[in-house]
Image: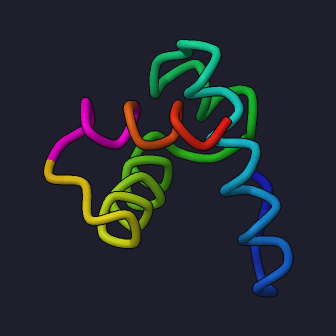
Amino acid sequence: MEKVTTPEQKKSQTNKIIQLLEKGYYDKRIATKLGISVRTLQYRKRELMKELQAKNAFQLGFMLGKDS
């Protein structure tokens, strides 16, 4: 598993997650591609939702799509 220890590594991992979400990948596939657990991925998605004030995964996807 890819261990994230610095803020830069966390930001890089978050950017990779966003790219894969935009491509329509499901959680399990994203986690596998990044070498992290599904639970870690879900935690990162919750952090993104909180940051963007998205109430659900659909809103998160919509908001991420608007920025690309």
Q: Is residue 26 above or below residue 35?
A: above
How many numbered dots are placed on residues in this image? 0
Specify the quadrant of the image occupied by residue 53: bottom left
Question: Could you say where residue 47 lies in the image, as x and y percent from the top left?
Answer: 40, 67
Q: Residue furthest front?
A: 66
> Which residue is at a point 38% across and 32% down the rendered structure image?
62
Q: Is residue 38 left or right of residue 49?
A: right
> Which residue is at a point 74% across and 56% down the rendered structure image?
13
Question: Could you say where residue 25 lies in the image, as x and y percent from the top left?
Answer: 55, 15
Magenta segment main secondary structure: helix
Task: Between residue 63 and residue 42, name the one nearer to us.
Answer: 63
Question: Could you say where residue 19 lies in the image, as x and y percent from the top left?
Answer: 71, 33
Q: Is residue 20 above or below residue 9?
A: above
> Which residue is at a point 47% across and 59% down the rendered structure image?
44
Question: Could you say where residue 9 lies in the image, as x and y percent from the top left?
Answer: 83, 72
Q: Is residue 65 above or below residue 49?
A: above
* On-image quarter of the C terminus: top right
Q: Residue furthest top?
A: 24
Magenta segment: 56-61
Q: How is the image coloured?
A: rainbow
Q: Is residue 13 left or right of residue 65?
A: right
Residue 52 painted magenta: no
> Which residue is at a point 53% across and 31% down the rendered structure image?
65
Q: Residue furthest left?
A: 55
Q: Is residue 66 left or right of residue 51?
A: right
Task: Between residue 44 and residue 62, name the one nearer to us.
Answer: 62
Specify the quadrant of the image occupied by residue 52: bottom left
Q: Is residue 49 above or below residue 66?
A: below
Task: Between residue 48 and residue 53, name the one nearer to us.
Answer: 53
Q: Residue furthest bottom?
A: 6
